[in-house]
Each structure stands twice: as structure tokens, then as C-alpha cells.
């Protein structure tokens, strides 16, 4: 990587991008909403059940100028969702500043393992055991989404719920490969603990990105 590209990356004026696409948000509070997704490359959390492991190595993905990313989004929905990978490995200030110029609604999906950068209308915090959120992450979460892979994840969910701000909406979401085993347990858990809601990866049922 040349010095100029490295500097642009450090400033957040360019980002490693695995993919960008227009689809329907399939998860959480905004499920069913037409959204333009920007998936950054690079992740240092490394969940063993991750369904986009190809995003982990930032060196495998092209580095694209922020203005080019935003230009591509303009013909689509007002909602732009930045995900990864772990997008907060990068400086998100230039990207959200540019999106806001065009009145885009900015959403981010993050593990919270890195400090927040960017101006966001909605933050989905999805903590991971492998690398827990920094303390400040719990304060800015609009929704808390815990992936349920095994029985211990229910305990983890309750631990995380105690840390998050009182306005955050609480979601449990089954890990896709374990959904048939865990969903009955999740239904019973939510019935006993109605502060939680169920989130499903509806886009996978619909067979869309």
C-alpha cells in the first residue's frame, strides 16, 4: 500500500470495502426497510460462527474513496447501513458527513469493540464474547442484539442488558446454523423475560442479500 492510500485510509477518506448493495434490512428494529448496505473489510473480533468471514482481512478488499461510496448510494433508499466486518476499525466521520449532505439516514451495526466515530441515526450494538464492547458503547446503543448460539448466550445476554442504556431495545437472534435447536428455547426465554424481543434473519428466509 502506498503512503497516499494509507493516509486516506487513516483519515477515513477511503475505506476497505467488501461489498455494497441495495436490499431489505432483514434484522432487528428496522427489518423490512429498504436499505443500502456498505460492508467494510476488516474485523479483529473473529466470531467462529460468523457468516461473512471473507470480510475479516481488510487487505483482501479494494480501498474505495468515501465520495465514490456515497455517490453509488444516491439512487437508492434514504437509509444507509454500514456493517462489516467491524466498521469501527475505521474512521467513520468522513463517510457519515458525506452521507448527511444528501439527507441520508445513517445506521451502523457494530460489536462496540472500538470507539465510536461518525454521526449515526441508529446504532445496533451486537456484543461478542471474543472481544467485548468498550464501556462507552453501551451508552450509545439504540438496540442491543445478542446472537444465540448456545445456552450460555442467554446468560451473556442478561449480563449485557444490565450494561446497556435504559432506552436500548433488546433483541435475541438465533445463529442461523443453530436456529432449529435454539428457537424453542428462545421463545420460552422471551415469554419469561418480555423485556426481550426476537429478531430473525428474515432476509435469509426470503433468499435475498
Image (cartoon, rainbow, N blue to C red):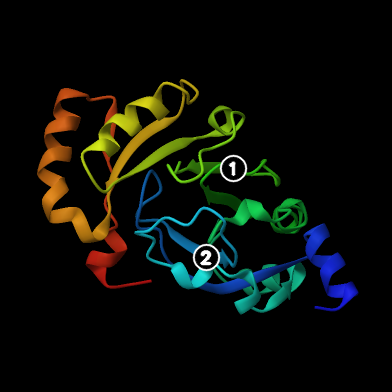
Q: Is residue 60 above or below residue 162?
A: below
Residue 58 placement (x, y as % from top left): 63, 70
- On screen, residue 86 versus residue 69, left or right, reads left
Please tell me which of labels 1 and 2 falls first in the chain: 2
Q: Position of residue 102 (x, y in %)?
A: 70, 58
Decide if residue 131 is on the left or right side of residue 98: left
What residue sits 48% from the left and 43% below the top?
124
Quadrant containing the N terminus in the rendered view? bottom right
Whether residues under marks 1 and 2 lie with C-beta atoms below 8 angstroms apart, the answer is: no
Q: Is residue 56 above or below residue 135?
A: below
Q: Name the residue at 77% across, 60% down.
A: 12
> If the image is split into quadrants, where does the C terminus sit?
bottom left
Name the residue at 62% across, 71% down. Answer: 17
Q: Is residue 12 left or right of residue 54?
A: right
**Circle 1 residue:** 121
90 vs 57: above or below: above
Label 1, label 2: how far apart the Cα atoms are: 15 Å
For numbered disc 1, what is the local secondary structure? loop
Amino acid at each position: 500500500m502506498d503512503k497516499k492510500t494509507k493516509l486516506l485510509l487513516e483519515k477515513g477518506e477511503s475505506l476497505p470495502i467488501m461489498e455494497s448493495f441495495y436490499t431489505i434490512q432483514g434484522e432487528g428494529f428496522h427489518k423490512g426497510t429498504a436499505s443500502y448496505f456498505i460492508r467494510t473489510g476488516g474485523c479483529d473480533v473473529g466470531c467462529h460462527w460468523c457468516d461473512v468471514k471473507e470480510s475479516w482481512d481488510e487487505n483482501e478488499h479494494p480501498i474505495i474513496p468515501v465520495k465514490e461510496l456515497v455517490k453509488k448510494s444516491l439512487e437508492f433508499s434514504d437509509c444507509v447501513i454500514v456493517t462489516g466486518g467491524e466498521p469501527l476499525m475505521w474512521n467513520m466521520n468522513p463517510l457519515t458527513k458525506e452521507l448527511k449532505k444528501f439527507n441520508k439516514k445513517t445506521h451502523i451495526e457494530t460489536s462496540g469493540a472500538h470507539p465510536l466515530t461518525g454521526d449515526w441515526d441508529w446504532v445496533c450494538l451486537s456484543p461478542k464474547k471474543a472481544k467485548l464492547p468498550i464501556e462507552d458503547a453501551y451508552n450509545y446503543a439504540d438496540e442491543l442484539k445478542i446472537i444465540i448460539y448456545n445456552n450460555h448466550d442467554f446468560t451473556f445476554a442478561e449480563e449485557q442488558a444490565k450494561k446497556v442504556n435504559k432506552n436500548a431495545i433488546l433483541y435475541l437472534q438465533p445463529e442461523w446454523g443453530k436456529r432449529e435447536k435454539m428457537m424453542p428455547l428462545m421463545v420460552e426465554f422471551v415469554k419469561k423475560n418480555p423485556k426481550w424481543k426476537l429478531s430473525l434473519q428474515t432476509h435469509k428466509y426470503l433468499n435475498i442479500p
